[in-house]
Image: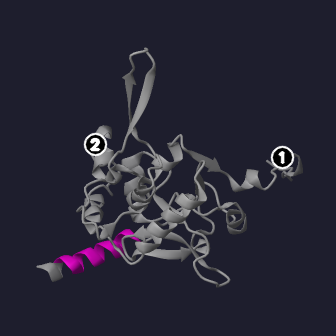
Amino acid sequence: MNTLLEKTGFWLARYLQKEVKGYKPSSTSDVSKLKKCLRPADILLLEGNLRISVAIKYLTQSTWSHAAFYAGSLDGTDDPNCLIEADTLHGVTAVPLSKYAGQHTRICRPIGLTEEDAQKIIGFMSDKIGMTYDMKNAFDLMRYLLPQPPVPAHWRRRMLALGSGDPTRAICSTLIAQAFQYIQYPILPDISSIKGDDNSVREILHIRHHSLFTPRDFDISPYFQIIKPTIEANFDYKKLEWSEGE
């Protein structure tokens, strides 16, 4: 039975990692500009052009289907592995930035992160390289590849949290969420208010379980800054060349 499940899981992983025919990114990323902008501990969000991307974008009602962690150069090659990510086929691996050349991306940067905590997160993520992907989650996602799957909006986030919960397995955004929770850096915590004796109000943050985090949460988090390479490269609209035709 385990062998059958493993074979089915491998087939499913290969199927989900196939590119969608006719995909055209809404924007493209110049790798050289990305490289100049990225800093260790940044999160790189990707629109994605895979079958699994369709399900994740539907369930999260978001542009983003995948999140990768920028650790900085992990080897001394010309095209170094610098992103740590999890995918259905390979599990947690380190990959070069060139893998996502020409894809629509967004950089999310944790604000005020100390160098010490940045190194802790990088160490946490590096230690996870080699983990396998949570295929229970992939089986769940498979059900939502229909054009309009009948899933109420308030259930969709939960659909991405149906993984096995096995600590030796990972999903891209949940693994990164774990890393930031490791140093108690907020992403989208639950917030409650407590009124003091002097009528002052204090906000108390409550950690949300890492399995509930999706790639879009880093985009909408008030604690991460959005970095756009074109703007960082001294964008000047006066220097643009426009076609004279229609």
- Dot 2 corresponds to which residue? 155
User: At label 1, which amino acid type do we have?
Assistant: Tyr
| Residue at position x 60%, y 70% in the image | 72
Quarter occupied by residue 106: bottom right
- Compared to residue 176, the image places residue 128 above or below, namely below
Q: Position of residue 103 (x, y in %)?
A: 59, 63
Q: Position of residue 216 (x, y in %)?
A: 47, 49
Q: Does the magenta segment cover residue 173?
A: no
Residue range in magenta is 5-17
For disc 1, the neighbor class at 10 Å (few under 14, some 14 to 19, many from 20) is: few
Q: Position of residue 184 (x, y in %)?
A: 44, 50
- Dot 1 corresponds to which residue? 237
Q: Main secondary structure of the magenta part?
A: helix
Q: Secondary structure at mark 1?
A: helix
User: At label 2, which amino acid type do we have?
Assistant: Trp
Dot placed on the residue nearer the N-terminal end, 2 or 1? 2
The reply, left or right, for residue 35 in relation to residue 168 is: right
| Residue at position x 59%, y 48% in the image | 111
